[in-house]
Amino acid sequence: MKTIVVEGHTDFIVMETLFPQMRENDVMIRIAQGFSNVFAVAKTLIDYGVEVLAVLDTDTRIPGNDNRVIMKRIQESGLAGRTINIVWMDSCIEDVLCKTNAEMFSRKARGINLKQAVLDNKEALLKLDEFKQIQEFIVG
């Protein structure tokens, strides 16, 4: 079994919308309720033999707070074979989504359902490296 661990509900909606084939590939999604909980959720799943992919925001827009540095420190002190595979969204998933459509989260678009906005841009989103990595995890 495989599991994708995400930080929050927005990430969950995006993953569920972009990758409806997760169920047929026996891939689950877990919402960790924030960056600080992802490590604990992922490590628990790994301990039970689940293959895990974490989808995390780098938070590079917060001065001095790049989550890649934090995760590197945490994982360096861990046990061999318990490393968390990570796909980084720089600076956050909303920024990555806007690579395909800068208007996706503009003032006008806020009224549009997130799921519909993702569906409307699905083809372009699936061409981005971040989502290609997730697709590979799901079907690989």
Image (cartoon, rainbow, N blue to C red):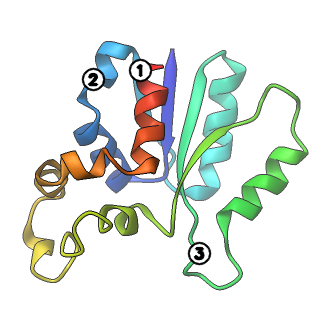
Mark 2 belongs to which amino acid?
Gln
Q: Is residue 30 visible?
A: no
In this view, 22 is above or below 57: above
Mark 1 belongs to which amino acid?
Val
Reading the image, the residue beneath label 1 is 139
Do the numbered discs 1 and 2 sit on residues whose CB atoms are within 8 Å? yes
Q: Residues within 10 Å of mark 3 (few under 14, many from 20)?
A: some
Q: Position of residue 30 (x, y in %)?
A: 45, 36
In this view, 54 is above or below 43: below
Q: Position of residue 69 (x, y in %)?
A: 76, 63
Q: Which mark is residue 60?
A: 3
**Mark closest to the chain's N terminus, 3 or 2:** 2
Dot 3 falls on a residue whose secondary structure is loop
Reading the image, the residue beneath label 2 is 21
Q: Is residue 92 visible?
A: yes
Quarter assignment of residue 39: top right
Q: Could you tell me which residue is drawn at 66 percent across and 64 percent down?
A: 67
